[in-house]
Amino acid sequence: MDGAQLLLGLANWSTILVCAVLKLPQGIALLAAKSARGLSLESLVLELSGFLVCLRYQSYYSYPLSTYVEYPIIIAQDAILLLLVLHYSGKMKHALPYAILFVGGWYMLGLQKWIVDLAMNLSTLVSAASKLVQLRCLWQTKDSGQVSTLTWSLATYTCAARIFTTLMTTRDLTVLVRFVVMTALNVWVTATIVRYRKPTKKTD
């Protein structure tokens, strides 16, 4: 195995391993605080939609499983986070409509090639919007509340790693542009979370 293949394997496996625990810090923060303060529901819904489109697109074109296997893992974690946010926000009645929307969307994406292609192009805008919505929430409250710095930092790493793996494998420009945009926005959100993090009060 040459150096490039070794790096590719490392990038793939590290991304998968990181994604396996990507949302865990955020989930723990929500459960500990019993509050969704600082976390945008709209951002989470948009992010989950973007992940579903990406999974559908790459599986539709039979790309190597190692280049997108993390998506089912992240989607499952995002779905749990969505339920937690709905619960702590007193909006659990919206859970069923969201489930119907996501399942119906998954089915629609596979009906025609042009649909999945269009959706993939739009998913970059949708995912970017999810980051911007989270940023807006942070700017308005000036308090990062229960938003996990570690989760967003790990997300930045996985997107950066996927830039490398995409260049080494499929070289799909649509996918590549998505990861470049997501990396930049994840860095921005992470920096904003750090900026608005309230200092922990010491207790005697």
Image: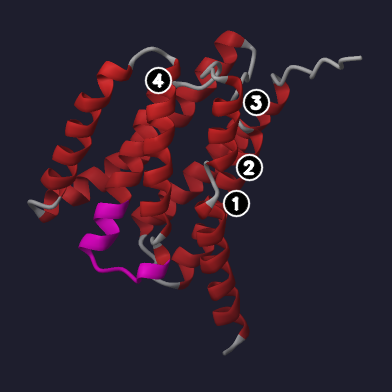
- In this orientation, which residue lies closer to the viewer: 72 or 176? 72
- Asked which quadrant contains residue 161, the reply is bottom right
Quadrant position of the C terminus in the picture: top right
Q: Secondary structure at mark 3?
A: helix
The image position of residue 108, as x and y in percent, is: 11, 44
Contact, CB < 8 Å: mark 1 with mark 3? no
Q: Is residue 137 above or below residue 95?
A: above
Amino acid type, callout 3: Thr
State the residue position of label 4.
Answer: 87
Contact, CB < 8 Å: mark 4 with mark 3? no
- Asked which quadrant contains residue 171, the reply is bottom left
Mark 3 Cα shell of 10 Å, populated few (<14), some (14-19), many (≥20)? some
Q: Magenta stretch: give its range.
A: 55-66
Q: Secondary structure at mark 1?
A: helix
State the residue position of label 1.
Answer: 157
What is the CA distance from the residue labelled 1 to the residue labelled 4? Answer: 29 Å
Q: Disc 1 or 3, which lies upstream in sequence?
A: 1
At a point 35% along the width and 29% down the height, the residue shown is 45
What is the CA distance from the residue labelled 2 to the residue labelled 1? Answer: 7 Å
Amino acid type, callout 4: His
Question: What label sits on residue 148 in the rendered view?
Answer: none
Q: Is residue 116 visible?
A: yes
Residue found farthest to the bottom: 1
- Asked which quadrant contains residue 66, the reply is bottom left
- In this orientation, which residue lies closer to the viewer: 64 or 101? 101
Magenta part, dominant SS: helix
- In this orientation, which residue lies closer to the viewer: 175 or 99? 99
State the residue position of label 3.
Answer: 192
